[in-house]
Image (tube, helix red, strand yellow):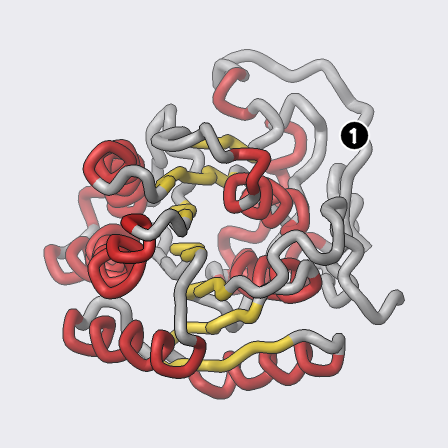
Amino acid sequence: MPDTYRSVFRPDLFSGQVAIVTGGGSGLGRCTAHELASLGAKVALVGRKIEKLSAVKDEIARAAGEAHSYACDIREEEAVKSTVTAIIADFGRIDALVNNAGGQFAAPLESISAKGWETVVRTNLTGGFLVARECYTQWMKQAAGKGHAGAIVNIIADMWQGMPGMGHSGAARAGMLNFTETAAFEWAPVRVNAVAPGWIASSGLDHYPPEMAAHIKSLPKHVPLARLGTESEVSAAICFLLSPAASFISGSCVRVDGAVPNAKRPREISNQHPAPQFDGFHLAAKPKVLAGTPGVLKK
């Protein structure tokens, strides 16, 4: 296994910049934090569990990168305000925000309580809004006036055909897309975009109950590219949107989903040959639930 991230971008792409990654202690956030650090960014890792953040911070340090960790529940407004203030005090600036923190549980709509619904919406919509708002009002707005507009990438999900079994998350993610489009207008020249991952072979898959294992393992056969995505493929889309190559892209959403929304659900997918994948994350590991699953090429 290589000891450094193998990004498709040039090593100094984000040199001198500061990037916040919420939910940076695991999964897509961890991978993205590693890639940003490998490209020269100083990374602020934000999440609820300081132990997980500290572990990622140490991983990045071993790879010659720089990261700090900040324990914060993004659902709590005052905590978000103080965390963004602390990041500015420590780093002196904010160039990028990867609004990645989120979570949900599997349940049919009829069994979701008001508390369960509100918890997911607060995490996947309200929390993301709070972090973005504070990054904008505390730093990016003033920096934009001086010619140093930053960029925000909101991580949503593939919810274009609904999210059966996770309707609370689908509603929140759809709201986050609309927030992205509104903020791109109101906060310009700060660029605000979204990335919508589809079915990704990430550690989060191991957090679902055992009764979902068979369904998770069946997912590749419903993907036109005949496999699940990698964390690196999502991170690459994020880094592109944060980079100068996307300097005229705002209010957009990049889908990283293998064309799943383009496959009508009643139709069988004939392609049985998985598409080539990119996996540059040197510390990536296949979720245990996917062991032996066809269409999962991740090591």
Left or right side of 243 for 76: left
Q: Is residue 31 above or below residue 273?
A: below
Position of the N terminus by quadrant: bottom right
Q: Residue furthest left?
A: 114
Residue at x 53% of width, y 62% of height: 17
Count every numbered label the image shows and give the total.
1
Q: Residue furthest front?
A: 146
Q: Residue furthest right?
A: 1
Mark 1 crowd level (few <14, some 14–19, many ≥20, 10 Å Cα): some
Residue at x 40% of width, y 64% of height: 94
| Amino acid type at mark 1 | Pro
Percent coordinates x, y for residue 249 in the rendering: 45, 30
Residue at x 56% of width, y 32% of height: 257
Residue at x 62% of width, y 28% of height: 258
Residue 40 shows in the view? yes
* Location of residue 226 (image quadrant): top right
Percent coordinates x, y for residue 136 in the rendering: 26, 56
Instruction: Classify mark 1: helix, strand or loop.
Output: loop
Percent coordinates x, y for residue 53 in the rendering: 51, 79
Left or right side of 241 for 282: right
Left or right side of 246 for 20: left
Q: Is residue 37 above or below residue 109?
A: below
Residue 121 shows in the view? no
Position of the C terminus by quadrant: bottom right
- Label 1 belongs to which residue? 274
